[in-house]
Amino acid sequence: MQEVINEILKFRDDRDWKQFHTPHNLATSIVLEAGELLENFQWNDDYDLQNVKEELADIMTYCLLFTDILNLDYKEIILNKVKKNELKYPVEKCKSSSKKYTELGA
Amino acid sequence: MQEVINEILKFRDDRDWKQFHTPHNLATSIVLEAGELLENFQWNDDYDLQNVKEELADIMTYCLLFTDILNLDYKEIILNKVKKNELKYPVEKCKSSSKKYTELGA
Amino acid sequence: MQEVINEILKFRDDRDWKQFHTPHNLATSIVLEAGELLENFQWNDDYDLQNVKEELADIMTYCLLFTDILNLDYKEIILNKVKKNELKYPVEKCKSSSKKYTELGA
Amino acid sequence: MQEVINEILKFRDDRDWKQFHTPHNLATSIVLEAGELLENFQWNDDYDLQNVKEELADIMTYCLLFTDILNLDYKEIILNKVKKNELKYPVEKCKSSSKKYTELGA
């Protein structure tokens, strides 16, 4: 993964684009790329696989750029969130159910 | 990174949730989590760092779950997109400019 | 406004497109058009006024198509929400503040 | 409709909130409310009608606030876009088809 991150940062720095990467701008960019991914499913599920790959890559790239500017460790924040979700969605209550945790009995 | 992916897949499979993870549903989920991240910047830039970390983690987690169901290699799709962007945004034309490539002279 | 709604419904029905207008598809379409509006502000605030007008029109059009398929009265749902917001955001607590109601003292 | 717009503007002005209503902030707010609407359809189509009404109302309200700050006429921009779409999606090519116009033969 570090190799991937290095390539992304090199791409950014070769263009001197870090100056545009505020947390606000990057959050906006993630939303816009996520919309482009979802556009594949707007009217039916005949998605374009090549486009799906590219949009997913764009979203992950902006996420990694976001972790860079705030000096976050992507592994740590993901693993911490998984732990939090394990408490929020206990296996015995959630198994095979798509109900949101707010709808699950106390 | 493989350790992180294994934790995410274990969380999903312990709950038997893969059945809900169609490409369409995951694309929708990425959009919704991206919106929650952006909400930190709706009226001003006083974001909540803990919330930012958690929303970023949610987005990356759904992206990794997406690559899993389509059997995609996250490294490969990101590196391929970086290569494509290098052709689309040549350094000599883009340096220090936030103009979109469509606005750059031919 | 009824004239506007009639034009929108005629456009839809001339193309026999109501069949694609499920609540889910229309909600997705609103998100995507909203993303296209926001794209005007991704890196700076030099928005394209003509594009802003068209994206706003698309969003309002999909909202009106949504009210049509669920047989909702746009006036009623907006006025009801304004009333609800008046209770949620009392003038004396909110005046000149962009703080969210959740952050306002009890 | 003018009555509805008057109520919305009164709500805003009673709280002195116009100062926060830049085009950028309102575009962001529309995206976020659109996400809340779409959340009703994230995992299945068992949407909450009351919530759908309120989110639709929020989106339309922000659109009307947007037209106010830019001094746009909502009727004019919608009718102009319908006219443009009539040229973009000719009845004889689009009838009963959900294909995007870009996929339609020339």
Image (cartoon, coloured by chain):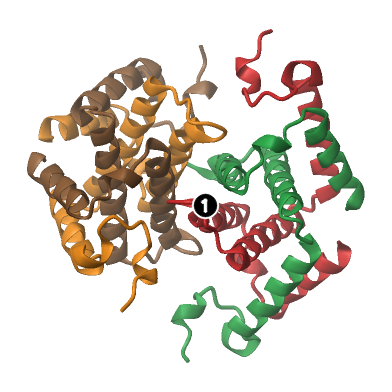
Chain colours: A brown, B orange, C red, D green
**Can the viewer see residue B74?**
no
Q: Where residue A102 sits: x, y (%)?
A: 52, 22
* Farthest residue, direction left: A3
Q: In this view, does D2 lie above or below C11?
A: above
Q: Where residue C67 sits: x, y (%)?
A: 75, 53
Count up the numbered dots.
Answer: 1
Between residues A64 and D18, which one lies in front from this camera angle?
D18
- Residue at 24% in and 53% down: B70
Q: Left or right: where does residue B47 sit relative to residue A73?
A: right
Q: Left or right: where does residue C74 sit relative to residue D85?
A: right
Between residues B102 and A67, which one lies in front from this camera angle?
B102
- Residue at 36% in and 26% down: B54
**Can the viewer see residue C24?**
yes
Between residues A50 and B47, which one lies in front from this camera angle?
B47
Q: Left or right: where does residue B4 sit relative to residue D96?
A: left
* Residue A81 location, quadrant: top left
- Looking at the figure, which quarter contains the N terminus of chain A? top left
- Residue at 27% in and 20% down: A80
Q: In this view, does C13 lie above or below D51?
A: below
Of the residues shown, which amino acid type is indicated by label 1? Asp
Q: What element carries label 1?
A: loop
Pointer 1 chain: C
Q: In this view, does A23 lie above or below D89?
A: above
Q: Mark 1 points at which residue?
A: C45
Q: Left or right: where does residue B86 sit relative to residue B20?
A: left
Q: How crowded is mark 1: few (under 14 residues within 10 Å), some or many (20 or more)?
A: few
Q: Where residue B30 sits: x, y (%)?
A: 39, 43
Q: Where residue B92 sits: x, y (%)?
A: 20, 66
- Residue at 12% in and 46% down: A4
